[in-house]
């Protein structure tokens, strides 16, 4: 027996002695692929195809120019293109180039296309070409969800969210700058001449000219949008400050999450409370939600043929005009009413008025239609003005009474005369204010955020739609509709299709 200790081979020695299978990445393989087995039976892409295949897509086929018996390349089946985009959005893919790339290697995309790769131009054009047809498909999916018992319109929650536009903050320019850039763009177009005469390929030359022309069109559109915004400003100084984006002229500066101001659009979504299904979607350029409730109800009625029995909204969507409109449509509204008293108090406090001289400290005389201030001076009636469906009655003290008063610095600092406004609310506003004091209304309103914000969270987190890829109000609405349609189909898969698949497999 040897006295030498056992010798442990080094790592290098073990590596030299080991026999491993080599990887040859230079070889070409010819193998058979069973396309039907690329995805499992319960894969979501099969559910999307099943739903799309059963829909009435006649409107999508009307624009196809290739027909049997005539020359020309065959067009891609709209069922395939629709299913590709729906599945792509469900996987947080919003780029036509990326969808085309995945057709070459992703099993789900390959299953849809039968191992074919679709050009990204075809995908990009299809996404924005069929607005009316896409609206009809959205309605058809809602009909399927209604038949499944997922929509009843007994209670609908509505809310708006700001989504960033495909434009940067620095793309906004004032009128003088836009006009200067537009003149330069026109000059460049004129100087380019015939693109085929340049010492570059026809393709490159035409691409350059197209880029310059598109920039000119965007600048012209930006200048047009800027002038429209200027017309809405009555103050000449404010009119000079108006700016428009040279990238997406129809985008507007809006306040987003965490107080950030950036170009964006206001996406309005109505959600049925029963199963959190989206029953209406719209896109607005307004930075505020006021006035968006009536169009939302009209969209729901257009999609489902009836209006909701109850709309639950936040205070930003409510005003007196909206409440009167909802009352005329027999729709019950649940939502907080703006407290004008607290707003007035905040404004007075900011101006330096002492709490002892807030409006509630003034005594109203109904017979004389006047007010008496805490110092004993009288404020007489000056007139009224109508704002929406409310009347604002104005009262004012005599200048000499205020100048002689020892409390002027506490009552009306920086002003010579104290005035007061008494707002007479419409009956609908008073009724809603009283309703919101009840425990039942408070409990219903607590459910609003869980329902109304659920689709927004799903679309932003799961679909990754935090910034639009498309530009312009029409195209942005198309992208929002694609996302909301995908969301509804995902709910159908989750609540109907997968449970049915589990039952059929079990049997």
Image: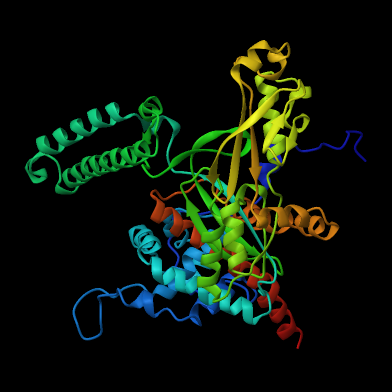
Q: Where is residue 27 shown, x and y percent of the image?
A: 44, 58
Name, please, the residue furthest toward the front. Answer: 367
Which residue sits at x=67%, y=56%? 427
Q: Where is residue 111 shown, x and y percent of the image?
A: 50, 72
Quadrant location of the C terminus in the rendered image: bottom right
Where, by quadrant of the figure, is residue 268 drawn?
bottom right
Which residue sits at x=21%, y=75%? 72
Q: Where is residue 342 shown, x and y percent of the image?
A: 72, 35
For the rendered model, the colour scheme is rainbow
**Image mark count:** 0
Whether residue 433 is situated above or below residue 59 in the rendered picture: above
Q: Nearer the viewer, residue 357 or 99?
A: 357
Q: Nearer the viewer, residue 216 or 306?
A: 306
Residue 494 in view: yes
Which residue sits at x=77%, y=57%? 435
Whether residue 149 is situated above or below residue 445 in the rendered picture: below
Residue 114 in view: no
Quadrant location of the N terminus in the rendered image: top right
Whether residue 104 is situated above or below residue 400 in the rendered picture: below
Q: Nearer the viewer, residue 361 or 96?
A: 361
Q: Is residue 139 left or right of residue 187?
A: right
Q: Where is residue 191 shown, x and y percent of the image?
A: 10, 35
Q: Is residue 289 left or right of residue 365?
A: left
Name, please, the residue furthest toward the bottom. Answer: 507
Whether residue 283 is situated above or below residue 186 in the rendered picture: below
């Amino acid at each position: 027996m040897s006295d030498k200790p056992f010798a442990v081979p080094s790592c290098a020695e073990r590596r030299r002695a080991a026999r491993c299978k080599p990887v040859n990445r230079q070889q070409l393989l010819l193998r058979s692929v069973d396309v039907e087995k690329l995805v499992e039976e319960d894969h979501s892409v099969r559910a999307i195809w099943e739903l799309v295949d059963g829909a009435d897509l006649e409107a999508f086929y009307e624009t196809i120019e290739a027909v049997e018996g005539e020359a020309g390349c065959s067009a891609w089946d709209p069922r395939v293109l629709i299913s590709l985009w729906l599945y792509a959005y469900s996987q947080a893919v919003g780029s036509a180039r990326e969808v085309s790339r995945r057709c070459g290697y992703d099993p789900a995309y390959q299953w849809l296309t039968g191992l074919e790769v679709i050009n990204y131009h075809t995908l990009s054009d299809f996404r924005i070409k069929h607005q009316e047809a896409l609206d009809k498909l959205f309605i058809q999916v809602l009909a399927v969800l209604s038949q499944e018992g997922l929509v009843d319109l007994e209670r609908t929650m509505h809310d708006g969210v700001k989504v960033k536009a495909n434009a940067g903050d620095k793309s906004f320019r004032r009128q003088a700058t836009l006009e200067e850039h537009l003149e330069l763009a026109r000059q460049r177009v004129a100087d380019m001449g015939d693109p085929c005469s340049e010492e570059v390929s026809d393709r490159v030359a035409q691409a350059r000219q197209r880029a310059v022309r598109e920039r000119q069109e965007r600048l012209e559109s930006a200048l047009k949008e800027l002038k429209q915004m200027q017309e809405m400003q009555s103050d000449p100084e404010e009119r000079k400050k108006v700016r428009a984006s040279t990238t997406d002229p129809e985008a507007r500066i809006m306040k987003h999450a965490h107080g950030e101001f950036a170009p964006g659009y206001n996406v309005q979504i109505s959600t049925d409370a029963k199963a959190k299904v989206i029953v209406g979607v719209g896109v607005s350029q307004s930075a505020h939600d006021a006035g968006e409730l009536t169009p939302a109800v009209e969209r729901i009625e257009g999609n489902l043929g009836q209006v909701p029995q109850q709309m639950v909204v936040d205070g930003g969507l409510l005003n007196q005009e909206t409440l009167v409109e909802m009352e005329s449509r027999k729709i019950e509204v649940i939502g907080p009413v703006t407290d004008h008293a607290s707003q007035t108090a905040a404004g007075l406090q900011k101006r330096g008025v002492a709490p002892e001289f807030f409006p509630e400290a003034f005594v109203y005389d109904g017979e004389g239609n006047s007010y008496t201030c805490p110092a004993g001076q009288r404020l007489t009636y000056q007139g009224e003005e109508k704002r929406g469906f409310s009347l604002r009655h104005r009262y004012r003290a005599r200048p000499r009474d205020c100048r002689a008063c020892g409390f002027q610095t506490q009552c009306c600092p920086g002003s010579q005369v104290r005035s007061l406004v008494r707002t007479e609310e419409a009956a609908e506003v008073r009724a809603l204010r009283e309703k919101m004091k009840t425990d039942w209304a408070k409990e219903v309103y607590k459910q609003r955020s869980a329902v109304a914000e659920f689709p927004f969270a799903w679309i932003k987190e799961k679909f990754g739609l935090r910034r639009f890829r498309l530009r312009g109000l029409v195209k942005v609405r198309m992208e929002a509709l694609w996302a909301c349609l995908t969301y509804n189909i995902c709910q159908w898969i989750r609540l109907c299709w997968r449970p049915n698949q589990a039952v059929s497999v079990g049997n």
